[in-house]
Amino acid sequence: MAAKTISEINERIRDGSALILTAEEMTEYVREHGTGKAAQEVDVVTTGTFGAMCSSGAFLNFGHSDPPIRMQRVYLNDVEAYPGIAAVDAYIGATQPSRSDESYGGGHVIEDLIAGKSIDVHAESSGTDCYPRKMLDTTITIDDLNQTVMVNPRNAYQRYAAATNSTRRVLYTYMGTLLPRFGNVAYSGSGVLSPISNDPEFRTIGTGTRIFLGGAKGYVIGSGTQHDPDNRFGTLMTCGNLKDMDTRYVRGAVLHRYGISMYVGVGVPIPILGEDIAAAAGISDAEIRTSVYDYGIPRRSRPVLRDVTYEELKSGIIDLDGREVRTSPLSSFNIARMVAGELKRWIIDGEFFVSSPAEQIRSRGTTKPMREIHEQPLVRDVMSERVHTIRTDVDIKHIAELLIEGNFNHLPVVSEGGALIGIVTSWDISKAVAHGETGDVRSSMTTNVITSTPDEPVEIAARKMERHKISALPVIDDDRRVIGMVTSGDLSKLLMRR
């Protein structure tokens, strides 16, 4: 059979004779009719995905104020954007947090702009002869902006690693909340609808490919950052006009105790130019595989627990070494299906035509880790292994004596089995003594203990202390037994040595 061309397919779209299927429908079509007939009859397969795409953002042009300002710092609803590209242009990243509200960030600003809401703008400058203004405060909507271009460095991962957690504590990650002791497996991606899974060799997807982006017509502008096709982690760099987008397909998000993100809907049309492309677009969830990793183990030594298919993940339960573990999706398959369906309607209605890439995206290659010239110190390198612990039945007077004699300020409280259940500080005991309390430690201890592990980088430990305004962290093992203590003083000594 002779191969079809993009021009021929677009002509069929114009005259209404094109057969357009979603990727789900294509899987059934190939199963029933085979790849040869699919290549002959089907013209375009539409794909879709909707998930947390942290590597996203938008370029905004505000126009000149009077008198003009060269913005050196700019905040939109108290979220900092990057203005170091011109006087009145800025890039707002999806994951940038608000200075005043940890549940709001760049992704929410972008969603609010698309929704037509008013955005508070605050800008600062040192002032120059041609840009004398030093401060600006105003309110804008998306209609007040000259250009609003969404430019996303990394979207539509070919697949995502699935994540689980072997430790006894909850982990809060970019894959969502991971429950202890293999309590769940979190996964992302739309499987059979995933754009790159339907064209893994990038035969039709490249620079200039017209796509669905956030409810608008957008483009692929190259391979995404972290593009790693050798390991089936291909990505796309995308762009589109924010003013044409729809909040059904662009949503600011908060991943609990991890941070801000933004959900983006991306759909790529796959023109069926030949049987090889038809075969790739006929893939099923049972053929798309990813790996389950234990996020309770540091990244450099994190093991693959098993390979798994998207069919298994979507079933709600997978087997991990004989244990049934529930799966939890981070992305929305339903909205991915809406993306593929809406793109299909656009093509059927003659509102959207497929395009040939101006340049192919490489289908081979991998990413490199960051080059580091200094080895990152871990908590085990600075923690004190001599830790005094107490049980809950110890009275306040005795604790005060221990703190004085031991010349330390923190006492972890452990259960009969040795697991950490609380912590008491010299400040806690001072308050108790001042108030005349004489009972055991339970009335004075903190039970929501912020902890560290020996393999945690000291930078993370320091950030925990700063965020929670504390001066020490008990260091625990997988059984929550206290094996050390790291203090702000330990970290200060490390910095002095470096």
Image (cartoon, helix red, strand yellow):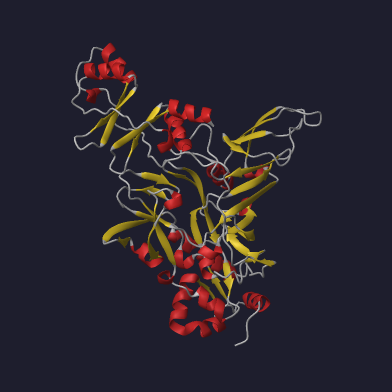
Q: Is residue 53 above or below residue 374?
A: below
**In the image, what residue occupies the spot 63% across and 55% down?**
240
Whether residue 11 sits left or right of residue 24 in the image: it is right
Q: Which residue is at the far right? A: 129
In terms of depth relative to the viewer, which is nearer, 60 or 257? 257
Of the 4 image quadrants, the one containing the N terminus is bottom right
For this rendering, which residue is in front, 431 or 106?
431
At 57% from the left and 68% from the top, the residue drawn is 269
- Residue shown at the point (52%, 85%) measured from the top left: 37
Q: Is residue 429 visible?
A: no
Task: Decide: is 370 above or below 292.
Answer: above
User: Horizontal and vertical percent for residue 266?
Assistant: 55, 59
Residue 95 lies, with reference to residue 48, above or below; the image says: above
Instruction: Indicate the quadrant containing the C terminus: top left, top right, bottom left or bottom right.
Output: top right
In which quadrant of the rendered view does residue 212 lie?
bottom right
Image quadrant in which you'd find residue 486 = top left
Q: Residue 23: tell me if it is visible.
A: yes
What residue is at 46 percent from the left and 30 percent from the top? 491
Q: Measuring from the top left, give residue 244's x and y in whole percent.
A: 62, 54
Nearer to the camera, 166 or 51: 166
